[in-house]
Amino acid sequence: MTAEQNIKQAISQGQFDRAILMANEALLGISDEQQKIAMLYTLAVANRLKGDISAAIEVNTRILKINPGHARAHQELGYAHRIAGNSLACAQHFYQATQLNPALIASWKALIEHYRHTQNHRAEALAQAQIDFLNSLPKQVMHGRDLMYEGQLHQADQLCRQFLQTEKHNAEGMLLLAEIGIALKVYNEAEFLLESCLTLHPQHKAAGIEYLKLLAKMGRFQAAKECADSLLSAYPDHPPVLAAKASALVGLGEIDEAIALYQQLIATTPEQAGLHLLLGHAYKAAGDFNEAVRAYQSAYAIKADFGDAYWSLANTKTYSFTDEELKAMQKQATLDIASEDKVHLYFALGRAFEDRKSFDDSFAFYTKGNDLRLEQTGYQPEVFEQQVENQKRVFTEDIFSKLKDVGASAKDPIFIVGLPRAGSTLLEQILASHSQVDGTMELHNILGLAARLNGQNNQYPDVVNQIDTSYFARFGAQYIQDTRAYRGDAPLFVDKMPNNFLHIGLIKLILPNAKIIDARREPMACCFSGFKQLFAEGQEFTYGLENIGRYYCAYMDMMQHWNKVLPGFVLHVQHEDVIDDLAAQVRRILDFCGLDFEQSCVDFHKTKRAIKTPSSEQVRQPIFRDSMQQHANFDKHLGPLKRLVSQWHK
């Protein structure tokens, strides 16, 4: 019997002092973070059951410092504060537990008691509906949802697949497996599951809404619009579906209709701050800066701690906060608010003080935002560095000689890779201004293929030496087919997922005629720009100067390898060169892509298309120079980053 089993047995027998002693002894020998959290949780439970509430609160607080997203620690704090008679803190922690893990029935039941006591009948009804839903699920699906919300995705995936072997057409099982696939970024498999689920169960609202969210994430906006219309025929005027349709319309460039839908929803429920935020995003995508600002301001007026509203204002890159807004943000950042709101506020404050040239205060807030986001992501730089080493080990000159031209012959994609904030949006806008090129978005298809190849039995990239060579052409053809939905009628299109630089070897095998452009920018400017940018998802390496410095070195090492084993396959474009001599660089890029020169590419800022990246305002201007030396204002704070960058360039 393991130490943890012995402790749990002692707890089950009511031997709480013994359990606490054993848990504290065990903690002395644990270095692994996850094992430490598990033991601390057991210790917290033992302290609560013993009646030592202050100790239980202290241990759960330790857990949340290590992992702010630990739902059961919040649930335990809810129990502890209930015993202590702190009703408000009790309700707050049970609520936070349900937000992090909606499968925690015990927390929902505790909230119902609170809502009844406070006569919040609407909230009580919503909590009861969630309990009824969870109780209706098959036990394996219920357990799988719990595992998924706790971040144990592979265990949840395995359990769900076992269930579906006997219950092949169970809607809840199919929906759960799709949600796990989305969390693992295996979007094509998730899409197939949700399509199948809706074919078998066309009125399944939850599957329909999840499908809508996935289609939007994949950029398949026409399909999302059609799905929303289908759902609305069954559930007329259903707010989440209407909001999803509006989001799809923004993606399709049908901004006026999207804005009208958001305004319709706001007229019905004006207190929904999130709708005002989405309306602002729609105005921003259309280039209507003034209306976007008004919508974001309406969002924080409704919800004073709505960090995303303030960050969205900062993320326009051109908005200047008023003194009143600055004071409001500073006040909210000191309160006990949701960590997600606090992260957004820290980054917004960093931008606000930077605009005011208070660079020390600005850096302090950027650092707070980075530190808190890093706590949430748990990014480990050595994991990525090992991935780079694995790519270098597998993708050698020999493998490209052995597997020459085994992929699909299509010439459609132009991949733009590199670090985020390196100028990729500008390059995409230049190319998308050509009559023969469609701009798309940051597509996840290559990342999804790499994830699928990284199975339980075969590890990517080693698996490329093991599979039948016919698969490479099939993978390439599948990529072309799967990305068709993002494109217009042009023969070429841009895939600007920056992280694809890790998978250039895979791209060469499946699409040997593709074009790859590596967007480069002066490293200090690029890395610091990433450090002060709060990304909607992914790019976890940007949170921390040392992390982003190590990632930069690994990226340069990876690109140096590709240049060696695939000479001429990648075109390196330096952002500063584009700024200094736009016309010459445009011709160089078009020549590389086999395209005739078109003046519209030089006049890229006149091209009308919805743009959703942080650089959307900049690329609507002829050339954006202001950010070239912004990092110099923070020079005294950037020691860890300068050290790593200079080491690489020695």
Image: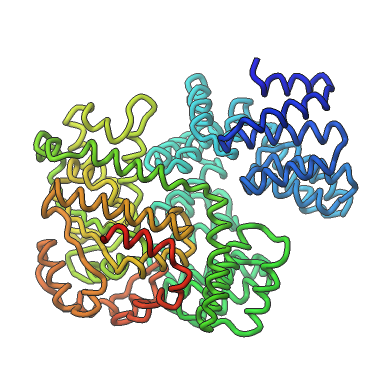
Quadrant where the N terminus lies? top right
287, above or below 490, in the image: below
Please report the residue visible at 34 percent of the width from the left and 77 percent of the height from the top.
Answer: 628
- In the rendered image, residue 64, in percent from the top left (x then y), is placed at 67, 47
Between 2 and 481, the one nearer to me in the picture: 2
Please report the residue visible at 70 percent of the width from the left and 67 percent of the height from the top.
Answer: 334
Quadrant where the C terminus lies? bottom left
Q: Quadrant of residue 339?
A: bottom right
Please report the residue visible at 76 percent of the width from the left and 52 percent of the height from the top.
Answer: 92
- In the rendered image, residue 109, in percent from the top left (x then y), is placed at 79, 40
Residue 216 visible in image: no
Between 282 and 48, the one nearer to me in the picture: 48
Please report the residue visible at 77 percent of the width from the left and 28 percent of the height from the top.
Answer: 21
Residue 382 visible in image: yes
**What colouring does the structure picture have?**
rainbow
Q: Is residue 266 left or right of residue 550?
A: right
Between 397 and 276, the one nearer to me in the picture: 397
Between 517 and 35, the one nearer to me in the picture: 35
Q: Is residue 328 left or right of residue 636?
A: right
- In the rendered image, residue 329, in percent from the top left (x then y), is placed at 65, 73
Q: Is residue 236 left or right of residue 93?
A: left
